[in-house]
Amino acid sequence: MPGRPANRRIWAIGALAVAVLAAAVLLGSQQRERAGEEHHAATQRLSHVHGLAVNPADGRLYVATHQGVVRLSDSHASLVGETRQDTMGFTVVGPDHFLASGHPAQGQPGPAHLGLIESRDGGLTWHSVSLAGHADFHVLRTAGTVTYGLDSTSGTLMASNDRTTWDSRSQIDAYDLAVDPKRADTILATTERGVQRSTDGGRTWQPSGGPRALLLYWLDAERLYAIAVDGRILLSTDGGDTWSPTGGTAPDTPVAFTVHGDQLFVATRTGDVRRSTDSGSSWQSLETGLS
């Protein structure tokens, strides 16, 4: 019949158009997926924050994370150096001078527990100092010449005057530690039984009294801060004998805390990092998207 070839051509053209449209849709979908993956990679956010500290060399906040050490500013977050170890216990002891512990990055050689590691170039490079393969410090604190480490593998508080040889002081199930900046033998620890105090370098402990706290930061002789388990920001001006609410509250669920001058910094379990300049009454979010 004369109309059939035309009908077949119309059908073929229509089928081809549908096929082209389907291919375009598929290609567009794939491109969107790739773009989404690239965007996700470009905007990867912090996870598993283990510590916060300000580097006196540049005044910037450094964050110990599962992927390495990250440097933050108001508008930028960047991984420091090439090392991507799971950075656990973390503290800044001087300009560009960091101490940490943790585990090697996935696929990297080395012992499962890094012991004490050190960086003297602001986190660009790290080297092993002591206890590699034997200790996993989840908390590190210093005062004067003394370094304290809370070893998660044994629940032992350890101390060292040279960061090479260590003394096991006591067993304590603590979440955080704070050391008196002027008296290195005086330590506070947050535990499920409340804040505990030691005046003999962590060998023995007694209840300190006051509200139950989660995180501590001993800034100077007159300013000892705590985040209570109910989120309130507390301040002690007498070394933890008495506490007063500042009127501020920590955001979300805090996992790390530090103070620099009149600035309070808190990291939450979701990877947010926030700053307060009014004792916790209000908070500003810092950029945490890694690019």
Image: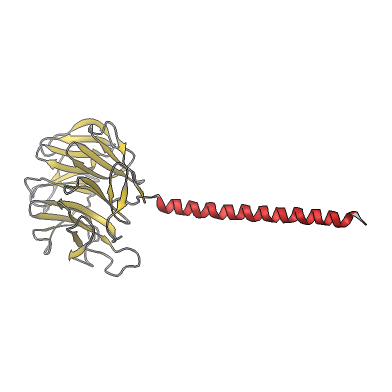
| Position of 116 relative to 144 (above/below) | below
| Position of 14 relative to 106 (above/below) | above
Query: Which residue in the rendered view is the most extreme toward the right?
Result: 1
Q: Which of 97 and 3 is in front in this view?
A: 3
Image x and y of residue 123, in percent = 23, 56
Horizontally, residue 19 falls left or right of residue 287, namely right
Residue located at (61% from left, 55% from top): 26
Horizontally, residue 186 falls left or right of residue 171, namely left
Residue located at (19% from left, 61% from top): 116
Q: Which of 133 and 214 is in front in this view?
A: 133
Image x and y of residue 135, in percent = 21, 63
Image x and y of residue 233, in percent = 23, 35
Residue 130 shows up from this direction:
no
Quadrant for the N terminus in the image: bottom right
| Position of 51 relative to 105 (above/below) | above
Horizontally, residue 10 falls left or right of residue 171, namely right
Horizontally, residue 52 falls left or right of residue 3, namely left
Q: Which of 75 and 86 is in front in this view?
A: 75
